Image: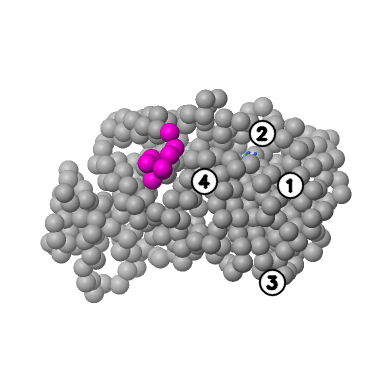
Amino acid sequence: MIQYMSARQAAEKWNISQRRVSVLCAENRIPEAAMLGNMWIIPIDATKPDDARKNNGAKMKENARPFVKWAGGKGQLVDVLKMSLPIGFGKTITKYAEPFVGGGAFLFTILNEYELQEVYISDNNKELINVYEIIKRDVVLLVNSLQLLQVEYDMCNMDEKEQYYYHKRELFNNMSLCKETKIEKAALFIFLNKTCFNGLYRVNKKGKFNVPFGKQSTPTICDQDNLLKISRKLQNVSINACDYHNVIDFADDSTLVYFDPPYRPLNATSAFTSYTENQFNDNDQIELANFYKTLSSKGAKLMLSNSDPQNVNPNDKFFEELYWDFEIHHIKAYRMINSKGSSRGAIQELLITNYKECIK
Ligand SMILES: C[S@@+](CC[C@H](N)C(=O)[O-])C[C@H]1O[C@@H](n2cnc3c(N)ncnc32)[C@H](O)[C@@H]1O
């Protein structure tokens, strides 16, 4: 049976515009391309036809980017974080650890821009870490599964897309993560992230993914080019599904550890800590601060970000008291996770380092 990809996927794969793919199909330049409804579908293993035209539209990006949208993702802060790296990073500091990796916005910046001797990432969300592992070891099989999901989704009208989404969500929730299911679960994880409301990963108390359908008509479910780049970048990265405390075995005086824990909620409605069935509360923030001190005394360089409670209450000294003997910087960020457009403005965040001198 022939496996197909959509015109959009062919466009991404061949680095040409989707319109150009349709023209090539219409000109019979792609063997076995077929019309399905009003869309072209193209055999997955079709090769790009010789085309004298230059590509003006699609641009090949060289850098790996996060493969999921993630609550609390640090895409907006990457430049500030880069300037806040300690002097010697990439020279005397040759190891990097990110024990709350999430979508890895900063991780990918580090992997794109630095050659490090050792990199360690972890998160206690097992489903998320499974995706990192599959991208590292089985990216081709993952891409095949995602291509199928992309073609099937693209073929549906909006009502069918919604039914398809809920069907896949149920499948994901009812399938336990094991050797036999890990590739399919990784593909479903990415599919759900790309098609759910606001690209959010949120689970209920039983640990079941419960984000509603996002009504997206043409999401990129399979970004093959990026997944292949990520796979290459992850080859020397140690990937761990575990609690952040385990980073202690990795961190030494030539390591930078970047902590990006779940935010301490600014108020009852801004709370988002449901990455897993366990919440991260004030006691967890206190425990983390104690752990920060322990690692600091081992000589590791440390950066930690969190929400700044002084956005809503200038007298709230929660973090000042916890981290009084470290450097506390107030930096500007843009919160993206709140669904109300009005709540997405500039906001102050905290960056806490155990060193004074930054790369700048
Ligand atoms: C703010 S997000 C990290 C976002 C990430 N920096 C990014 O750019 O996408 C916090 C992450 O910590 C993870 N997490 C929560 N509690 C944890 C724990 N005790 N140990 C390890 N990871 C934890 C969550 O699953 C979530 O992915």
| Residue labelled 1 has its Cβ within 8 Å of some atom of ligand 1 | no
Q: Which label sits on residue 91? A: 3
Q: Which residue is mark 4?
A: 129
| Residue labelled 2 has its Cβ within 8 Å of some atom of ligand 1 | yes
Using the rendered image of the protein, determine whether residue 25 is visible from the camera's viewpoint: yes
The type of residue carrying mark 3 is Lys
The foreground one among 324 and 316 is: 324
| Residue labelled 3 has its Cβ within 8 Å of some atom of ligand 1 | no
Q: Nearer the viewer, mark 3 or mark 1?
A: 3
- Seen at 26% across and 51% down, the residue is 6
Instruction: Compute the Cα span from label 1 to label 4.
Output: 26 Å
Q: Where is 250 relative to 153, above or below?
A: below
* Quadrant of the image occupied by residue 175: top left
Is the Cβ of the residue at disc 2 closer than 8 Å to that at disc 3?
no
Crowdedness of circle 3 by 10 Å Cα count: few (<14), some, many (20+)?
few
Q: Where is 183 relative to 87, above or below?
A: above
Q: Which residues are magenta?
A: 176-183
- Seen at 70% across and 60% down, the residue is 255
